[in-house]
């Protein structure tokens, strides 16, 4: 049903336009949840049938939902899943928070200060071009295989998307808005907090979302090579011992971390910039 048809139907039923819009949004959210849930259930069913009942794929290589569920129960009962997930979560949170603070601060400063931009851009471009994993041997030499080697790699993985997005957000502010604010006597502080920063928020949020993915990649890779605990270590060990059920459980937990982090960023965006959420909803 199109928007005009639904509005016309609502008026015939005596419903107000505001109520019609609320009903439309409610149905849209319900449809999204129903379709998403059905698609996931269909995928899991096909996977289980192909592997277990039709025996088209060896469970040793692809596992199956029932095997993964049993492996998850085993890891939860032994406490291993919570131990590994806790280590990864600690490494992830510390590195990501540090990257968010430093990346956004430096990106905004570079966008507002011309000479800092000129001085820092070559280093940012060079470091951003180098794969972060290339620094891991040096990081291990400096920090060992304790928590800080993983935190540093997470920091390096997440900081540059945040920095670059914050920089582009500040630089992309409409100059006419800044000129208009100055014409009305606004101070540089007012211009930043009332014009530049609100305009840069979508870019900052985009940087945070990109940073989540980079941070997860970094922490898992770091735990592959420089840890005896964590989800990365669990994935590596499970793969080496052909425990594909345990491997998929660890991957699922990593995915859940990513989903929760992205959801948290979206909720924060609604609190900080509700006008953006309303615009996206429209």
Image: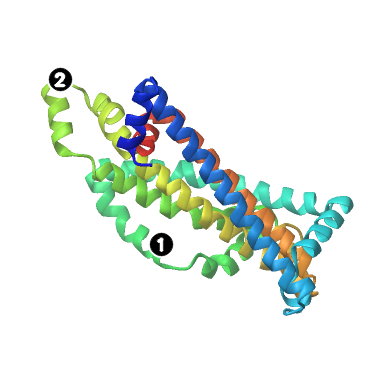
Give whichever of discs 2 and 1 has the lower sequence position.
Answer: 1
The residue that appears at 48% across and 44% down in the rendered structure is: 100
- Assess disc 2: are there few (<14), some (14-19) or many (≥20) residues with their C-alpha within 10 Å of its C-alpha: few
Residue 240, how many percent across, how many down?
76, 75
The residue that appears at 32% across and 30% down in the rendered structure is: 8
Looking at the image, the residue that sits furthest to the right is 78
Pick whichever, 5 or 75, lies toward us. Answer: 5
Residue 97, how many percent across, how many down?
54, 43
Q: Is residue 54 above or below residue 161?
A: below
Report the quarter where the N terminus lies: top left
Q: Is residue 14 above or below residue 109?
A: above
Disc 1 marks which residue?
128
Residue 231, how many percent across, how many down?
71, 58
Disc 2 marks which residue?
185
The residue that appears at 69% across and 67% down in the rendered structure is: 47
Residue 108, how many percent across, how many down?
33, 41
Report the quarter where the C terminus lies: top left
- Assess disc 1: are there few (<14), some (14-19) or many (≥20) residues with their C-alpha within 10 Å of its C-alpha: some
Pick whichever, 208 or 154, lies toward us. Answer: 208
Q: How is the image coloured?
A: rainbow
Pick whichever, 238 or 181, lies toward us. Answer: 238
Q: Is residue 8 above or below residue 30?
A: above
For marks 2 and 1, give the CA distance: 39 Å
């Amino acid at each position: 049903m199109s928007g005009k048809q639904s509005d016309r139907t609502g008026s015939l039923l005596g419903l107000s336009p505001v109520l019609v819009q609320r009903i439309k949004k409610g149905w849209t959210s319900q449809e999204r949840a129903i379709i998403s849930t059905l698609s996931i259930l269909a995928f899991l069913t096909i996977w289980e049938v192909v592997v277990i009942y039709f025996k088209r794929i060896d469970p040793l290589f692809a596992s199956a939902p029932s095997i993964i569920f049993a492996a998850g129960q085993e890891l939860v009962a032994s406490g291993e899943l919570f131990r590994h997930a806790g280590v990864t979560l600690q490494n992830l949170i510390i590195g990501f928070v540090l990257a968010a603070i430093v990346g956004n601060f430096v990106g905004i400063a570079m966008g507002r200060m011309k000479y800092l931009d000129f001085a820092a851009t070559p280093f940012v471009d060079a470091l951003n071009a180098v794969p972060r994993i290339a620094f891991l041997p040096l990081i291990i030499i400096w920090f060992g295989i304790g928590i800080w080697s993983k935190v540093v790699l997470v920091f390096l993985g997440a900081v540059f998307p945040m920095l670059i997005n914050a920089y582009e957000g500040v630089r992309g502010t409409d100059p006419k808005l800044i000129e208009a604010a100055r014409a009305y006597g606004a101070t540089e502080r007012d211009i930043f907090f009332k014009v530049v920063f609100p305009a840069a928020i979508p870019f900052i949020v985009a940087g945070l979302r990109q940073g989540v993915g980079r941070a997860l990649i970094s922490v898992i890779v770091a735990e592959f090579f420089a840890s005896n605990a964590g989800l990365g270590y669990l994935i590596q060990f499970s793969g080496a011992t052909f425990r594909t059920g345990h491997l998929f459980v660890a991957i699922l937990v990593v995915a859940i971390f990513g989903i929760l982090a992205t959801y948290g960023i979206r909720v924060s965006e609604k609190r900080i910039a509700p006008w953006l959420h309303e615009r996206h909803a429209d």
